[in-house]
Amino acid sequence: MVIVKGLIPVRDNLRESAVALAQELAQQARDEQGCLSYEVYVKADAPRVIMLWQQWTDLDALERHFDSEHLDDFLDRIPDMIDGEVHSLRFDVTEDGEEPPAGPVPSALADGTVLH
């Protein structure tokens, strides 16, 4: 299983629009093969920060998500709403005795930059 946590600081006056956009992305992502969970949260202690919490069956499912039209649409529309640095973390969850995947792992930032 792969878990992704993204933190997106947004402009205060665009918070509702950014949350709605993130919820639209989450709804579409939940229909993707391999998506176990895709949740949108607003941090109680930092209401300008949207947190995306994703759970995928495996890295292949996450990579398919990175190639999806709805993620491209989100990445095209969110940059003007961002106010600060976007942070993302990826966790590879393994069963006892299972080796974690080897090699570099791509990650997408809200500005559309793909890290390898």
Image (spheres, rainbow, N blue to C red):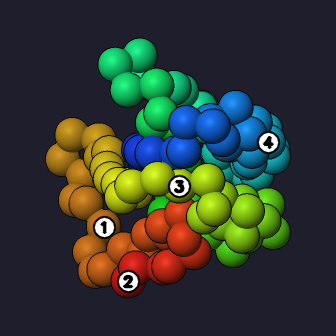
Residue at image mark 4: 24
Residue sitting at 53 percent across and 27 percent down?
41
The label on residue 55 is: none
Under circle 4, the secondary element is helix
User: Looking at the picture, does residue 35 appear above or below residue 68?
Assistant: above
Residue furthest toward the left? 97
Residue at image mark 3: 82
User: Looking at the picture, does residue 104 appear above or below residue 56?
Assistant: below
How far apart are the two marked residues, 2 and 1, measured between alpha carbons? 14 Å
Residue 6 point in image, percent of width and height: 44, 48
Please give left or right for residue 108 compared with residue 116 in the image: right
Residue sitting at 50 percent across and 79 percent down?
113
Residue 75 point in image, percent of width and height: 66, 66
Question: Which is more foreground, mark 3 or mark 4?
Answer: 3
**Three-letter amino acid code at disc 3?**
Ile
**Three-letter amino acid code at disc 2?**
His
Asked whether residue 19 is in view, the answer is no
Under circle 3, the secondary element is loop
How far apart are the two marked residues, 3 and 4, measured between alpha carbons? 17 Å
User: Looking at the picture, does residue 90 appear above or below residue 93?
Assistant: below
**Mark 2 and 4 residues: CB-CB less than 8 Å, in contact?**
no
Residue at image mark 1: 101
How many marks on residues? 4
Residue sitting at 54 percent across and 71 percent down?
111
Residue at image mark 2: 116
Please give left or right for residue 42 compared with residue 95 in the image: right
Residue furthest toward the top? 44
